[in-house]
Image (spheres, grey):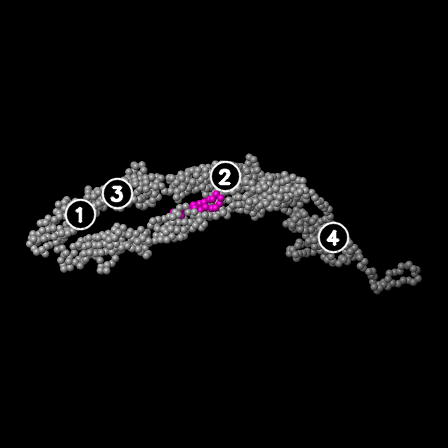
Amino acid sequence: MVENQAQSSWLSLTVSVDRSAAEDSLAFETLVYQVEIGEGYRRDSRVIQVRAHWSRRSHLSTSGLTYSLETEAGSPPAPFRIHPKSGWLYLSHNLDYETESTFRCRVLARASPANATATAELTVLVLDVNDNAPVFSSEVYHFTVSEAPSPQGLVGTVSAVDKDSGINAQLSYILLSDGKFFRINAKTGEIINWVALDREHHSQHTLKVMVTDQGHARLNATATVHILVTDTNDNPPQFTHLPASKEVNVQIWAEVPAGSLVTNMFAKDSDAGENGTVALSLVPEEAGPSHFVIDGETGDISTTEHFSQNSRSFYTLRICARDGGAPPLEDIAVVHVQVHGLEAPNGRADYPLVKRFVVREDAEPATVIGSAGVPNKGRFHYSISEGDGSVHFGIDGSSGDIYISRPLDYEAATQYFLVVRAEDAGLAPGANVSVLVSVMVEDVNDHTPWFPDKLVQLGLSEDAAVGSLVFAFQARDADGTLPNSAVRYDLTYDPKVADSSSHFPFEIDPFTGSLTVATPLDREAAPSFAFTVTATDQASRKEERKQAAVAAQVFLLDVNDDRPVFRSAVSVQVMEDAEAGSLLHRFVSKDGDEGGNGLVSYTILTGNTKGVFTLKEKTGLLFLSAPLDYEAQRLHHLTIRAADHGLPPLSSTQTFTVEVGDVNDRSPVFSQNIYNASVAENRDPGEPVVRVSATDDDSEENAVVWYSLLPGPGYELFSINPHTGLITTASYLDREQQPHFSLRVQARDSGSRPLSATATVLCSVLDDNDNPPRFMQSSFRVSLPENLPPGAIHTAQASDPDLGENGTIHYSIAGKKLAFMFDGELKQLWDVIRLRAGEDGAGCFVVNSRSGVVSTTKVLDREEKQNYTLTIWARNYGPAPLSSSTQLQLVLLDQNDNAPSFSRKSYQASVSEGLPPGIRGPPPQCF
């Protein structure tokens, strides 16, 4: 019979249902907790208390419950910690709404004795607190606007942002200055010009703008706006030296040569640039070319040619002053020119006799300056009939000598015209002769220069640029001509005077008297300067020169030009367990300005986003307002601004470092809670398994970590390097005995009160091909009826405790011939069947290389061979394959499958007759 191929085994399993466990269920008061908290709450503030309870039927106490937190995957780390006994949730870090506004985590309650757990979802919504002041996009804005007769509307827009949200981020803009010409849109920050601007009156406006949010305890910021008013051509040139009629009378002598100066015209335009550049020109006369020309830049009017008999004695010149604007503006002035000494058209002069005299203005009265006598012989009587000099001069009636009757003054009149009438007693009345006398007064340096003031005291802003005009000293000299009336200025100062500097910062133009800034000013170095300005005329003879002096003093007005300079330390160290409210530091700075310009206030610009520090604005005292955490932040870099109260204020910044001293308040933290490792079995002790790593956010000794293995199943088979955390094998491992190990590793710091943490190492032992396949028996005996059709007759089963290829078994039969078996599914060449000469069953049996099923390949006949002995091999697929074999003894059972048969078809024999029955005769003979 065929041996049963199926195999089975039985296991009895008893399941006990503990009804009491169902009654002792653990649950939270609610499945979802949701709480709101303002971002102003500080570390260690209470948030919410969670509670778990047992079911109603339970008699267990909640005092043994332990609470913990888990952060949901993908959510930011929750800045909370939970008290394991009370269930109170505390802030572990300060909140910042602008960084993260929602936190989600899971609360767990665990009962150790009952091994029960419960979970609930926790959502914490952070509410915004007005902790961010608005920030302008720029501290200083520059806009330009053209002057115009009507308001220009929108000038520019200032903008600010606030990191807060809601009402805390709603901004309002306020104009703190110059509300006469400008207004600001409170919502948009648009600066509007609502009163017409005139650059000539106010060329630049400086505004102070404040932005404030709408939060409780509003926060604000300020910015400076500079508005430059650009020029338009809205002012025509003006002849400032002329009377209201804009007319002037000038007299000249006909014999002056071409190019002689007649008079000078001056026009001024208060506009700027091309709009204020004035060019002078003569308006063409309808009567033809004029005898005069004007220099367009200097305004000098001069003659173009000598006057002839065809010239007119009176000219009216129209002078046009035109600026360079587009379109240009202009003004017109009139110059009346009287020409004396012209000949009449008939060739005779208006006055047949002309006399010219020159006299010094200091000539004494009665001094004879010349004679107007007629050269013809005869007796004449002379008299002055007309002229503007009849008062200052007299004439001897008989001789015609002209003398000074009153003192002359060049500054009052430089030239006199007299008409002398000569009457001849022997002639007819119509024979009288008129003589034209021209008296030129020669200037004498008889006037001393003088200053309008005895003392000049000036106030000058210390930020006046080099080259700026400080003051124009104007000494006057009543002399009428150059060089007597020309004044040269000189400046002297005494460097010994206490308020004067050895580097005198002013210089004076010797020609114009303009006092200008020569070097940069600094009120803080020298607040005032005393000096003397001397004006000296330029008489030809130096010994005749006269001079005058005036004392002057310039007081420098303070400008906010000095920034505060920090004088205090740049760092401080404080232990992380310092209490809130502790004084950390005092900032000290110096500002060389005076008054409000030198008053300093302090603020924290950056680095205090979590509100850990408080800085007193006026005193500069820095306080700790929230607990420090060395592990969270070891260095706090604060940007401190010291700003004065000037307009605009000046400031300087200092990077101040708060160094947090470590306290051993942090346990080591493993890089992983669970380490997965593997090691091959049978390796020599000392084989590396895995390196664990823990870090401690403390410093120095508090951060030095030591590693150790905690007692547990199989921990003695491993060792750990206490410094590096490298875990190695301590003995040989056998996967077949224990394939997995769970090791607990402790990391402990070196603080005076050490703190520790644990992690789990899950170690898998990797298989090594150290076990050959094993058959259940060394030999099998199978009885099989003969004449069965080909088919399975036995299953050879072997086992290999190794894994993978090391435990995968290949079956084969030792036969007479070499044969190769190819598995179409695995696509690989199977092993070569080993030969043994004279082995039984060659060609009669095959074995399935995977299942071990032995089958016949043909019908077996007991009458041919009654017994077969097969050697079946089992071999694994390890790198160095291991194998074993078993003997299969096959016995064929007989079947009645053969009928009797004669050995010959016929037999022939002879027998003697008469033999009695039973007598055996000779064998028959076959034919």
Place of residue 627 in the rendered image (x, y in percent of width and height, measured from the top left): 52, 39
Q: Are marks 2 and 4 in contact (CB under 8 Å)?
A: no
Q: Earlier in the sequence, mark 1 or mark 4?
A: 4
Q: For the residue carrying disc 3, how many other residues have a C-alpha within 10 Å: few (<14), some (14-19), or many (20+)? A: few
Place of residue 346 in the rendered image (x, y in percent of width and height, measured from the top left): 14, 60
Main SS of the magenta part reads strand
Farthest residue in the front direction?
429
Rounded to the nearest angstrom, the CA distance separating label 3 from label 1 is 27 Å
Q: Secondary structure at mark 4?
A: loop
Farthest residue in the top direction?
752
Residue stretch rendered in magenta on the structure = 206-225
Q: Which residue has dot 3 on it?
A: 452
Rounded to the nearest angstrom, the CA distance separating label 1 from label 2 is 90 Å
Q: Which residue has dot 4 on it?
A: 5
Q: Secondary structure at mark 1?
A: strand
Q: Earlier in the sequence, mark 2 or mark 4?
A: 4
Q: Is residue 492 left or right of residue 568?
A: left
Three-letter code for the amino acid on which mark 3 is drawn: Pro
Q: Earlier in the sequence, mark 2 or mark 3?
A: 3
Q: Which residue has dot 1 on it?
A: 442
Q: Which residue has dot 2 on it?
A: 625
Question: Is residue 718 or residue 423 the one in the foreground?
Answer: 423
In the picture, residue 601 is in which quadrant? Answer: top left
Q: Earlier in the sequence, mark 3 or mark 4?
A: 4
Rounded to the nearest angstrom, the CA distance separating label 2 from label 4 is 84 Å
**Does the magenta run of residues contain 846?**
no
Rounded to the nearest angstrom, the CA distance separating label 3 from label 4 is 141 Å
Q: Secondary structure at mark 3?
A: loop
Rounded to the nearest angstrom, the CA distance separating label 1 from label 4 is 158 Å
**Does the magenta run of residues contain 217?**
yes
